[in-house]
Image: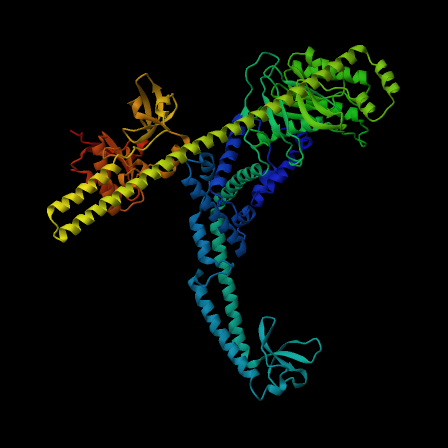
Amino acid sequence: MNDKSAHTLELPKILDRLANYTSFSASAELARDLTPTPYLDEAQDRQRETTEARRLLASHDHITIGGARDVRPDVAAAERGVVLDPQALLDIRATLRQATTLHRILGRLNNQFPLLASIADRLEECTALQHEISRVLDDSGQVLDSASPKLSTVRREMRIAFDRLQSKLHNIVHNANNAPYLQETLITQRHGRYVVPLRAEFKGRIQGIVHDQSSSGATLFIEPLATVELNNAWRELQLEEENEVRRILRELCDLVGHEAKYIISTVETLAALDLIFAKAKYADAIKATEPELLGFRPAPHPHPGSTLRLLAARHPLLDPRTVVPIDLELDEETFALVITGPNTGGKTVALKTVGLLTLMAQCGLHLPTAEGSRLSVFKEVFADIGDEQSIEQSLSTFSSHMTNIIGILDVADEESLVILDELGAGTDPAEGAALARALMDDLVDRGVTTLVTTHHPELKVYSHEKSGVSNASVEFNLKTLAPTYRLIVGLPGRSNALAIAERLGLPSRIIQHARGMITSEDLIADDLLDEIHRTRDRIRQQQDETLYARQEAEQVREELRERLENIETERRQLMAEARHEAEQELEALRSEVRRVRKQLMAAGQPLDAIRRVEQAAGELEGDLLPMPEPATSLPGEEDGFRPRVGDLVWVTTLGAEGQITELSEADAEVMVGRLRLRARLDELTPRSRAESKREKKRGSRRSVAAEAPAAVASRTASPGLELDLRGQTVEDAIPAMEDYLDAAYMAGLPFVRIIHGKGTGALRSAVRDRLHGHPLVKKYARGEEKEGGDGVTVVDIVPTH
């Protein structure tokens, strides 16, 4: 890719922001060195990697590269025989540990994130090296006593020698005879030797070697002769310890050097993964989407077959709260776009947005656009934007632009994207316009995808004369005298100079005089453009109003539907409650009759008296027994119910909810769960959405004892096709299943499903053991995979006679 164009389009600024999302220096370096790929397959892989990383970090937010370090310089030094300091070795261990963690996590998630897992598969764990570093060093970088038997022995002897030395010195400084000669009763160190502070005037009173004196000269620091040998012994052991530590570290560094190529490869792989994670984090930060990257499709010459469709595109370096999104889409016949409009209207920003997003997409970055954006992968992206006047080279703005354009023309081809700002500017308008047309002719005839901005009105007509070229413009609000920064593809820009001058208060006589100097053709064209823009604005306003009204109508419709469903729900609840209360009263009466009968019998009442009581109770019971069946609709609704394909219905013979998939005059085909069955129309009752939602919330558990009061009916009522036992203990589940099988048999169900889940298998085994040889079970088998596999047992019920 052209480096100069990448800088012109500000790609390095994007890469700097990307580097801020990396976790260590190696990946930050990769981010800043990232270049767009000209290859379609590689660009698509980069996009898919970023998408996978966004999904991974969203579902596994604990995954990180934190703790890794760029240890490649240290590893290379160890390979050359340099002895590393302990902290460098700990950094190597931390990096390998992070690689091990990531390698194992992504290995387990291979099916969900295959691209990331394939990259992580290149990570080397170097387990032996990790263990050896941990065996030798503690977390603060100190060599452990257990690093070698010799070191352990030396350090033990050091402690003994040190204790002896300190004990001897302690006796000297606390000896009453020496107290007058000492400046203080303390033990200190000078030049690696332990000494005591002696007053200068008492020099010689304590025999020893003078190692130092105070700045005032009043104190001499002497090593008593009695401790010289002890000091020597302790110092010799110190030197022996240092030599042993150096030997241990040298062996450890030799091991690092032996694993150097694997460690360096691991660091580079970690950096690659961290770069992908940084792309994902940056995409989330700018609310980006994955673009669809395409190759060049076959197209008639000179069309190169390129695709450019950016929806609601935002420049990622501008403030997202104020930036105005643009839509830019080239139809199948267009590959060159001429953008016109006023200065500071957003033309240059539009060009930079397209160019920068193209480069970002080929870097594997998601784009700040709406879903559905598509663009081709270009071999080169060239851009000439801005004022590049050079004082040192004595080049004017025009010369500078022309030098860049000449360089672009030499190398641009059908797989290039060329972006030119203010084409033909900086020179005589007539010559500039002619040169701009000639340049456009050359690029279009060669089949180069081209985006240009210009002020030359001649190019407005050019797109209508040249195949493959289309106009575009940036809006300008004449009321506020400010640009709206919206890009309109298909319409050239209007000339707003006279309108702006009039709005600013320029006398009308001057305005009219200026209009008189403009050719009638230009005036007519400008008036037509003005009328087109006004018509477009009216249509857009009408579309917005229509959309708003439509949304309001949908909202009202939803509210009404919800209210109707709630009314139906409340009605059913009231009727169910009334029936439940009546049944409770009836049961209370029956209990009272039984109690009175027992009392009469216990009191020895004559049989006739008991019979009279029973007869009276029977008459009262007869008055209460004719209870209405649970209503499924308001009076008259049964006759008015007209089933349609797609309606939710309740199949009364099965006690299950389904959806009508096929309808005839006498019956209907109903989808109940995964089953298709035919039922008579009189066996179907309407089912509201609210009832269906409540049923789904309650789950699919079905048992006679758990049915709602409104569903209490005769003994032949269906308990449903499924029984959910998940979460129950074996002691609770088996009796519930027995009751359910009894109810299913009485209802005449041909088969049922027992849902027990997989889990440890204990509940499944208990269920199947009980089903084996059960008098109501014809046969049973595990469910199909689509039904739940081993988590479900399908039971065929013996037929009723």
Q: Name the quadrant containing residue 349.
A: top right
In the depicted structure, whether residue 609 falls above or below residue 189: above
Q: Nearer the viewer, residue 442 or 184?
A: 442
Quadrant holding the C terminus: top left
Q: Residue at x 21, y 39 (%)?
A: 619
So how many labels did they put on this image? 0
In the depicted structure, whether residue 691 falls above or below residue 247: above
Q: Position of residue 413 (x, y in %)?
A: 63, 19
Report if residue 302 is visible in the image. yes
Q: Position of residue 671 (x, y in %)?
A: 33, 25
Q: Position of residue 74 (x, y in %)?
A: 55, 49
In the depicted structure, whether residue 566 falls above or below residue 636: below
Quadrant holding the N terminus: top right
In the image: residue 700, left or right of residue 461 = left
Q: Nearer the viewer, residue 64 or 79?
A: 64
In the image: residue 533, left or right of residue 758 = right
Outermost bottom residue: 177
Q: Name the quadrant containing residue 466.
A: top right
Q: Nearer the viewer, residue 314 or 663?
A: 663
In the image: residue 37, left or right of residue 259 = right
Q: Position of residue 308 (x, y in %)?
A: 60, 22
Report if residue 378 is visible in the image. no
Q: Nearer the viewer, residue 547 or 393?
A: 547
Q: Residue at x 65, y 86 (%)?
A: 202
